[in-house]
Image (cartoon, rainbow, N blue to C red):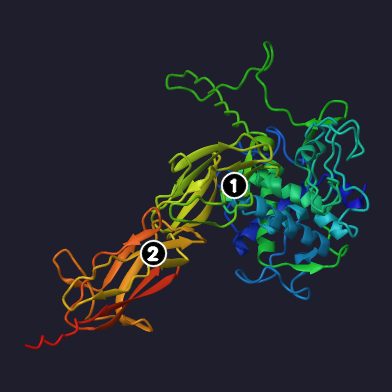
Amino acid sequence: MAAHIRRRLRKGATTTAVAAAAVAALAASQAPAAPLTEGSTGGDQQAAGGESGGPEDDAATGNSPYYTDLPPLVTPDRPGSSSNLPAATGSAEAGIPASVLAAYKQAERTVAGTDPACRLPWQLLAAIGKVESGQARGGKVDANGTTPSPILGPALNGQGFALIKDTDGGAYDGDAVHDRAVGPMQFIPSTWATWGQDANGDGRKDPNNIYDAALAAGRYLCAGGRDLAVAADLDRAVLSYNQSTEYLRTVRSWFAYYQRGTHEVPDGSGVLPTSPSTPTPSTTPGGTTSPTPSPSPSKPGGTKPSPGPSKPGGGTSPTPKPTPTPPPKPTPPPADTLGSLENAGTGPLTATAGGTFDERVSVRARNALGAPMAQLPVTFTVTGSTGTLFEGGRKMVTVLSKADGTATAPALKAGEKSGDFTVTATAGTTRPRTLTYAASVTARQADAIVRTDSKALVAAPGEKFADAVTLKATYKGAAAAGVAVTATLVADADKPAENDKGPHFKDADGKPLRTLALTTDAEGLLRLPDLFADENPGTYQLVLTTEGGATVVIELTVEAAEETAPPEA
């Protein structure tokens, strides 16, 4: 076992006192990234508070020892500045070995893609990695990110530590009797069996590989729908890793330190911590050690409990019974916990008014381990004023996800009003995950419009044009129903400004109109209202333009009847 791991087992009461003093000094000189939540102080061991990343009465590390070294009081950079300082900047403690730093940042990106609501910062992984293994023994990893020899904690045999009997047959920790914390992030084998990841793509989930271990730690910290940008959730996440208030304070100190700036150093050249945490075992007769037992009531014939304060009159008050601590709420296993909701390949959502959308909204649900989650209810909701609905005329539908985690909404039927709307997918109850898709309905279009006959349109001044004008609009060769068409009477189609004389339509009061908004019928046909000529003879033009840009120009002629000479007498 490596020398620094052996040092973790030394018992030194002085270390704890020095660490506590350093924490106080650090708190006085540096504002932490987020405050410790109320209830996270006092006592050397503290439970995670009902929401645990791993087994309910356990922690990722089995509460094994850790390094208590604190960061320097001089921060690597001033608050609010870069968190990626150049290699020549900052103290040695601010340096993180290249492969280790890359693993933390890769884990942050991966988790952000599958569980963005967690908001995992890589600096938190760096803080835990520093406290657990000194950044993989100062970055002693090979080109793939694997330590040359396993980083092992002490046997968790109940002698000052948790009692965890072997769960892996010694496969990871070489101990077939008790479990030991393993690797740069110090997972116990039973926790690794649930949370282990293959982040470097070599086909193995190896706790001794910094890439695999960092991603596993990231997913573990995000379990239960935690948002690590919230101080209370971050505290619970760290305490689920190791249920100790001192551990939480130490990790918090390094987290704040790394947030103020870090720099990359070569693998193998990181600074190794020196101060291990020290369990507080008690000595039993015969010289063996065991954890200090909790006080128990005296047996009959044994020492009686001390009397309580005297009552007025000389009586004594009975010793108050301790209030029982309620058991923590059960945490669902990671496989049953919704981790993320992601787009399952939905393309652009666009359709013409009255049409059916080619694309269907599809999402994929993943559990806290990143695996597809089946049989999860996903609710899809349409919001907007276009009149768009799902098949069956519903604005809201609920679909169960399939074995691959996908849930696909029914087809969308576009309404008659053009414009934008949204479709929102929602899953989960405790901390719902949502995805919102933008969609749009475009107006019905025509790419061609023509007259249905070719008769010349002629009228005498002040008279009505005798022949009605009928047109047909089409889109890709098919009748274009419900297409908006604008009809404008102009003097010259090359300068299509509305004319102020010549042919015109009439409104309800009989007044001239020279621009009309019309719509094609179900067959794509458009029959114009009656046209009238005024007293101004000449040649005029009627321009009709469809939604979609199709145009037709129709010539109108107003001419007086030829005068004929009276017959000779």
What is the secondary structure assignment of the residue under circle 2? loop
Q: Residue furthest left?
A: 569
Considering only vertical position in the picture, is 159 above or below 234? above
What is the secondary structure assignment of the residue under circle 1? strand
Nearer to us in this view, 126 or 20: 126
Identify the residue shown where x is 69% and y is 32%: 57
Q: Which mark is residue 452?
A: 2
The quarter holding residue 85 reads: bottom right
Q: CA distance from mark 1 to mark 2?
A: 45 Å
Q: Nearer the viewer, mark 1 or mark 2?
A: 2
- What residue is shown with label 1? 362
* Residue 252 horizontal side relative to residue 532, left or right: right
Nearer to us in this view, 257 or 107: 107
Residue 275 appearing in the image: no
Identify the residue shown where x is 85% and y is 67%: 266
* Residue 547 horizontal side relative to residue 106, left or right: left
Which percent across, then down, holds residue 373?
66, 38
Which percent across, then down, holds residue 213?
79, 49
* Residue 131 horizontal side relative to residue 470, left or right: right
Which percent across, then down, holds residue 114?
66, 50
Q: Amino acid at mark 2?
A: Thr
